[in-house]
Amino acid sequence: MPDGRLLVCATPIGNLGDVSERLRTALSSADIIYAEDTRRTAKLLRHLVISVPVVSLFTGNERARTAQLLEAVEAGGNVVLVTDAGMPTVSDPGAAAVRAVRDAGHHVSVIPGPSAVTTALALSGFGGDRFVFEGFLPRKGPRRAERLAGIAEESRAVVLFASPNRLAADLSDLCAVCGGTRAVAVTRELTKVHEESWVGQLADAVDRWSGPVKGEVTLVLASTDPVPPSAQGAVAAARQLVAGGASVREAARTVAEQTGVSRRLIYEALLDDQESS
């Protein structure tokens, strides 16, 4: 029996015209396709007039589906892995499947393609000689404060994904820790009919994008000199922790350790918040 293999395939991030010949060939020759969203993949296959069995593999069932995927490869199958859009494993499931197939000694290959990360970076005009990708910010709590503090200290360009319903909050918190003058690109619905890009300062972005938006959003913060620890940014990060349920004392201690800003200064600012509320 011939050895099976896993093909990790990038799919269009919006415009189905971006399908490459290699992707078309990979999908049409697959024995089975594992997809994050079977409905999205079914639409792509209909567009390409391809009929191949599709099985879901998303965050909730990734462990069980990875075991099934490995069995298909070990049985000699030509297995394809795709996500909703872009490259599997990049803020999407799939890494466990790649590890499992590779560790079992089978062949893994990648079909490259569209990426919201590099598309937004190119569209921003900020340059991409050095950049970092942060994915989605945590919704709340210590992990969000820690991530924001790290971004504030980052001198390279930073690319982030933003939920349409969380965009306003993300921009507001980024402005608080990075400063209102830092340049940002807000890109939406990349490669689609209603593609939109906006470039300006974070303070202006907070005003421009004050409510929920439609579609997928990718943010790019321009590279800058490292931002030294600031009392304003530290207090903003501590307020996030308190809003997430942390005590004033705990929030002050955590942020002081992360930023080097005086714990007493942060603590007193948080106490002032409580007295004025």
Image (spheres, helix red, strand yellow):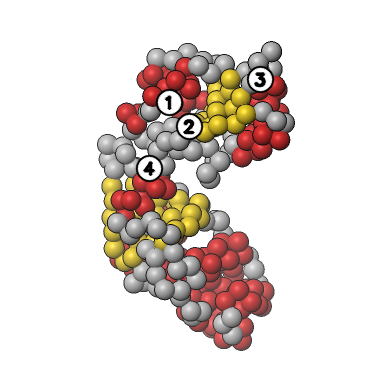
Which residue is labeled 4 in the image? 215
Q: Where is residue 95 in the image (x, y as percent from the top left)?
A: 61, 39
Closer to viewer: mark 1 or mark 4: 1
Closer to viewer: mark 2 or mark 3: 3
Q: What residue type is labelled 4?
A: Gly
Which residue is labeled 1 in the image? 22
Q: Distance between the residues labelled 1 and 4?
A: 28 Å
Tell me the SS state at disc 2.
strand
User: Would you say the residues marked 3 and 1 are in contact, meaning their CB atoms lie under 8 Å apart?
Assistant: no
Closer to viewer: mark 4 or mark 3: 3
Q: Which of marks 1 and 4 is nearer the N terminus?
A: 1
Can you see residue 211?
A: no
Q: From the image, which quarter does the N terminus lie in?
A: top right
Q: Left or right: 146 with respect to 102?
A: left
Q: Which of marks 2 and 3 is nearer the N terminus?
A: 3
Q: What residue type is labelled 2?
A: Ile
Q: Which of marks 4 and 3 is nearer the N terminus?
A: 3
Residue at image location 67% in from the left, 31% down from the top: 101
Residue density around tag 3, few if under 14, some if 14–19, many if 20 or more, within 10 Å: few
Residue at image location 36% in from the left, 52% down from the top: 121
Vertical side of 20 occupied by 264: above or below? below
Which residue is labeled 3 in the image? 3
Q: Position of residue 80 (x, y in %)?
A: 55, 25
User: Would you say the residues marked 1 and 2 are in contact, meaning their CB atoms lie under 8 Å apart?
Assistant: yes
Viewer-side residue, 248 vs 155:
155
Q: Distance between the residues labelled 4 and 3?
A: 41 Å
To which quarter of the image does residue 128 belong?
bottom left
Q: How far apart are marks 3 and 1 (CA)?
A: 21 Å
